[in-house]
């Protein structure tokens, strides 16, 4: 294994490891929330939990009014985490994330980013290319380092490692994070390849090298890096998100410095990855043990509580 490959695998994992303190805080908060629900259940306040199982248009409501038990580690009310269950749920959850990522407001934002990228291409790209041609290879070995960090293949390898570890340790939070990262990076990668083969088919990189997926626009390393960073930011806040965004920005800078991409390619790639990563992470973040979590008020009794929804 080369140093470049090693760096590409270790850096994404180290960002997740740096989230350890945030994980502890989040779990403490979760336990506190559950204790608050227990206190409400023990008092005169009626607490109801609702689990809705949906199959096509058929919905079955299961009511439970007994006090809830506090999960000791992450979410113990879920069944044991397993590859088989995840494989069965993957198509539905993946396409739900695709639908969410390309909702109307996101499409408008991406269209605006596409317009900005086109304007940059017409006005700034040539000047930026000339500048870097006059100062070639300024990063020396640093180019290989950041190219490795931004390699989408290394992102998938890091996610696979996280996912395997979450199954081994039955860590529900790490498990959910790995699934969110997989969907975000996958949707971003597929979107990037589609754009390269269609809209960006005739674009060329400054160094003249042919992209295997079509044109140079947008930058795949940049889009994947920003998608990864956006998910980490949503899960663990700016303490992890800011360093992740900085690394993603340096990946984009390296692509320009190495002559692999124009500034316009990197700008749109960054927006594409951010929008998809943030949207997917937000959707996964409101789920609890694979279920969507939302407030619930019983129309008949007026009881309040938490609604858990799971689609099959």
Image (cartoon, helix red, strand yellow):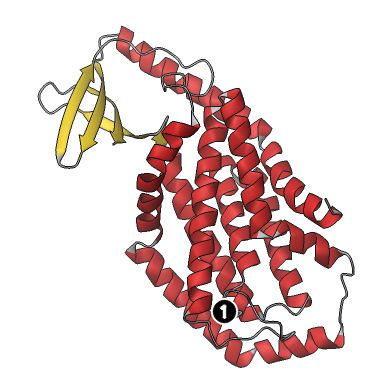
Determine which quarter of the picture holds residue 294.
top left
Q: Position of residue 76 (x, y in %)?
A: 46, 19
Residue 294 seen from this side = yes
Number of residues whose C-alpha sits closer than 10 Å to that of mark 1, classed few (under 14), some (14–19) or many (20 or more): some
Q: Residue at x 52, y 28 (%)?
A: 172
Determine which quarter of the picture holds residue 119.
bottom right
* In this rendering, position of residue 70 left or right of residue 219: left
Front residue of this view, candidates 81 and 259:
81
Residue 286 seen from this side = no
Q: Position of residue 153 (x, y in %)?
A: 65, 56
Question: Secondary structure under badge 1?
Answer: loop
Q: Position of residue 163 (x, y in %)?
A: 58, 37
Residue 240 vs 271, above or below: the answer is above
* In this rendering, position of residue 56 left or right of residue 103: left
Find disc 1 in the rendering and name its residue: 214
Q: Residue at x 67, y 83 (%)?
A: 205
Residue 147 vs 264, above or below: the answer is above
Residue 194 vs 61, above or below: the answer is below
Determine which quarter of the picture holds residue 21.
top right
Q: Residue at x 61, y 53 (%)?
A: 229
Quarter holding the C terminus is: top left
Q: Position of residue 285 (x, y in %)?
A: 45, 40
Residue farthest top in this picture: 42
């Amino acid at each position: 294994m080369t140093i470049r490959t090693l760096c590409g695998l270790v850096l994404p994992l180290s960002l997740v490891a740096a989230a350890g303190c945030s994980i502890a805080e989040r779990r403490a908060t979760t336990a506190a929330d559950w204790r608050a629900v227990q206190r409400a259940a023990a008092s005169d306040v009626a607490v109801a939990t609702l689990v809705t199982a949906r199959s096509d248009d058929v919905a079955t409501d299961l009511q439970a009014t007994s006090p809830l038990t506090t999960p000791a580690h992450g979410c113990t009310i879920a069944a044991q985490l397993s590859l088989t269950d995840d494989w069965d749920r993957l198509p539905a959850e993946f396409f739900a994330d695709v639908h969410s990522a390309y909702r109307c407001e996101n499409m408008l934002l991406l269209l605006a980013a596409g317009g900005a990228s086109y304007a940059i291409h017409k006005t700034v790209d040539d000047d930026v290319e000339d500048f870097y041609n006059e100062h070639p290879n300024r990063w020396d070995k640093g180019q290989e380092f950041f190219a490795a960090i931004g390699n989408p293949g290394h992102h998938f390898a890091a996610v696979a490692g996280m996912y395997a570890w979450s199954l081994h340790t039955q860590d529900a939070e790490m498990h959910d994070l790995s699934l969110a990262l997989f969907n975000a990076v996958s949707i971003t990668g597929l979107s990037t390849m589609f754009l390269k083969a269609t809209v960006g088919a005739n674009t060329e990189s400054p160094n003249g090298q042919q992209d295997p997926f079509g044109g140079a626009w947008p930058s795949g390393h940049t889009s994947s890096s920003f998608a990864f960073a956006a998910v980490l930011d949503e899960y663990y806040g700016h303490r992890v998100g800011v360093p992740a965004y900085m690394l993603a920005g340096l990946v984009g800078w390296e692509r320009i410095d190495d002559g692999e991409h124009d500034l316009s390619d990197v700008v749109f790639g960054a927006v594409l990855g951010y929008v998809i990563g943030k949207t997917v992470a937000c959707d996964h973040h409101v789920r609890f043990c694979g279920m969507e979590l939302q407030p619930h008020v019983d129309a008949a009794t007026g009881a309040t509580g938490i609604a858990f929804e799971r689609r099959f």
